[in-house]
Image: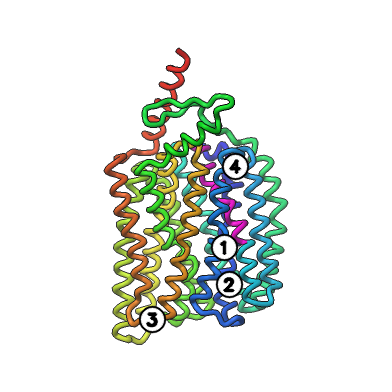
Amino acid sequence: MLRKRLTLVMTVNLFHIMAHIYPYFLPILTLIIRDDFSLGYTQTAILAMTSSLVMIPLTILLGFIGDRLLRWRLELMAVGFILAVSHTFIMFAAPNYNILIVAAVVGGMGASIFHPMALPMLSQEFGEQRNIAHSVNMIFGTIGSIVTPLVAIYFASQYHWRITSLGFGIFGAACLPILLIMIIFAKKELQYKPQESVVMDEEVFTVEEGKKKRFNRKLLLAAFTGPVIALLIAQVFRSGIFRILNIFTALIFEDQFLVSEIGSAIIMSSVLALGGLSALISGFVSKKSGSLKSLIYSKIATTVTAVLLVVFVGILMLTGAAMNTSFLVIAIILFVLLAITFYFGNAPYNSLLAECVPLEVLSTVNGILDSLMSVFSIVLVVFGMIIDEGYSFPYEFVLIIIFALIPLLLLLYVKSKIGLKTPKEVESDRSNSYEKINGANNE
């Protein structure tokens, strides 16, 4: 199914690459910028969190819009890309920390658009193949996460971070015409249309002319069942690990493991690359074994890895052991395991949410989820403040255990409520429900 609509898939994938280059460009470059502006971990975290604060109201609004402007979601992604690219030009000209905050605001506006539009689109367009669609999409996003630290840090070290910002801006502007042309052809491959009837708590609601607004309100309220609320909370806590991996990995290896700037960037890219490979594999695995089962296994492994990471770093700090190559290798292995186990749950989660939420309001629910995750970005500041305090024990890494354990417990609750099904079984049940409804309405 993916091959038959390759233009649509590749258009979304390319936008996903850009969504992982530009919104994370400023936080990554703080590894260099902080020397010019004398930034501590706390200020770095605030700068990184600014875009997330901007996303809090916007992602809800854009998710709501996405459910109503289905045919225009690709164009809206292009608008987000333009805004995200624009913030690099502001960085180039920024004379002080405050203007960098402005750049982060503009970048946050652009970053607000992609996920509430693209992830529901993949789930709606590809049915029981959505696990694979999400995993392929995830690997393209990870390409952006891999390339950006290496290229940004290397060029900033060689030429200056301002010139690097300008270069990224020019590259984005050059890519825009290509993406716009791809949108024209991708729109022809869109097939999803909201169902006319939906089962909610054994009642049938039919969309009728003049009643659509009332229908959408009822449908949205019906979407927030106990399992769905648990899934949303689980993903919010999971996002803490994602943000730490993407924002602090290079900083941690430079400051705590005495690696050079470019070496830290290489380690960060390698960690994220292996995480992306894990995400790709998880799509094929979860399609066969089921989204929830794969997600639970991911969380168990992430929790175990987080505990090992805390024990390792804690021993180093409490004993005051001198850093050497062996310790560095162990640290890299633990961060790689953390990324692999975490990313393995991404495609199953996106698919599981689509299996539990009516597709007609999936963009709205995704927008609410993205907003909650943006609120949760406060953990970046907490993480940075703990490091700045310089405790003898790595309490900041204990946060990672919390961000893994709470989702695991919530997922076990979800399992007790909905059981374990494969995507094919879910789509079969959904199709049978619609057929029964339409048959009853025809009679």
Of labels 2 and 3, the one closer to you: 2
Name which of mark 3 and mark 1 comes first in the sequence: 1
* Residue visible at 55% across and 54% down in the picture: 57
Is residue 260 at least partly visible in the picture?
yes
Residue under pointer 3: 325
Earlier in the chain: of badge 2 and badge 3, it is 2
Question: In the image, which disc is placed on residue 29?
Answer: 2
The image quadrant of residue 144 is bottom right
Q: Residues at badges 4 and 2 in contact (C-beta under 8 Å)?
A: no
Q: Find out whether residue 110 is within the magenta segment.
A: yes
> What are the residue bounds of the magenta stretch?
107-126
Say which residue appears at 32% left-offset and 46% top-offset: 293
Task: Name the residue rendered at 64%, 59% in the picture.
Answer: 84
Identify the residue under disc 4. Answer: 8
Any part of residue 18 in sight: no
Magenta includes 327? no
415 or 282, nearer to the observer: 415
Q: Left or right of 394: which side holds 266?
A: right
Q: Marks 2 and 1, Cα distance to the nearest angstrom?
A: 15 Å
User: How far apart in space, not on screen, are marks 4 and 1 (Cα)?
Assistant: 28 Å
Q: What residue type is labelled 2?
A: Leu
Quarter of the rendering occupied by the C terminus: top left
Q: Residues within 10 Å of mark 3 (few under 14, many from 20)?
A: few
Residue 249 circle label: none
Q: Relative to 424, is 137 above or below?
A: below
Q: How far is the residue under mark 4 from the one under mark 2? A: 32 Å
N-terminal label among 4 and 3 = 4
The reply, left or right, for residue 437 in relation to residue 69 is left
**Label 4: element kind:** helix
Q: Name the residue under label 1.
A: 51
